[in-house]
Amino acid sequence: NAGVMQNPRHLVRRRGQEARLRCSPMKGHSHVYWYRQLPEEGLKFMVYLQKENIIDESGMPKERFSAEFPKEGPSILRIQQVVRGDSAAYFCASSPMSFRTGNGYTFGSGTRLTVV
Amino acid sequence: KNEVEQSPQNLTAQEGEFITINCSYSVGISALHWLQQHPGGGIVSLFMLSSGKKKHGRLIATINIQEKHSSLHITASHPRDSAVYICAVPNFGNEKLTFGTGTRLTIIP
């Protein structure tokens, strides 16, 4: 079991470009969560998805950010027209069912986005 | 929203010392996470616990649901334990995790 796979590990984008971050959950996990860690700050929730559904996106910035978790393939966090303030580490976590039931998260290694 | 406070923010200790990191939260929860993050590294889930105590190697986590408080202990600390330790709790009624600000632990040989 390969765990939660995120790629790329490091991503450099120029201002105005698009960034696509991928997250493949653990086998058998149907719940995916994205978190952002700004430099010298704590982790903040962004979005919670199940297959083909966005369950909670209350932590997502209103513009330029979107997320999906298609029936087939990884979950994608997409940032359009990146700005320097988007530079951060983006972590994905997955779980087999709702966290409230007590089943634990597994985190990926993160994608470190640098906007130049 | 669940508020999460960790203490201390920074902790430096000599190798071999017993370490305690504390976490308090404001709203009753189903379970609490302790996470470890090395500089520039990924996040490793150390424990998820909903009551009592769990032990894994030199790490021990306890939780008191009534007092809304959890502690992470490290026995016989080692320089490789140097990392940021983060507690995280779900917001009541939904799936979001709220994280503490983390405790930066440095173990000196």
Image: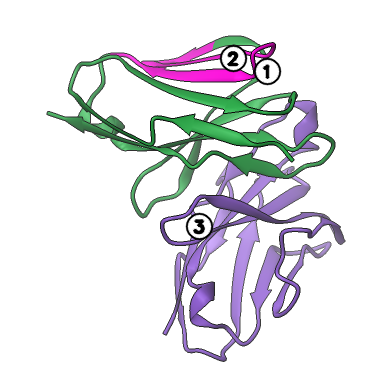
Chain colours: A purple, B green
Q: Quadrant of the C terminus of chain A?
A: bottom left
Do tag 1 and tag 2 residues touch (Cβ < 8 Å)?
Answer: yes
**Residue B67 sits inside the magenta stretch:** yes
Determine the secondary structure under disc 2: strand
Do tag 3 and tag 2 residues touch (Cβ < 8 Å)?
Answer: no
**Residue at 67% across / 69% down in the picture?**
A77
Q: Residue A110 shows which numbered tag?
A: 3
What amino acid is found at the position of numbered circle 3 in the picture? Gly
Q: Residue furthest bottom?
A: A16
The span shown in magenta is B54-75
Nearer to me, A35 or A68: A35
Residue B28 image-quadrant placement: top right
Q: Main secondary structure of the magenta part?
A: strand
- Residue at image mark 2: B63
Nearer to me, A105 or A88: A88
**Residue at 70% across / 80% down in the picture?**
A64
Side of A100 where B107 appears, left or right = left
- Residue at image mark 1: B50
Q: Residue A7, how many percent across, how many down?
A: 53, 65
Chain where mark 1 sits: B
Examine the rendered structure and indicate whether residue B95 appears above or below residue A32. above
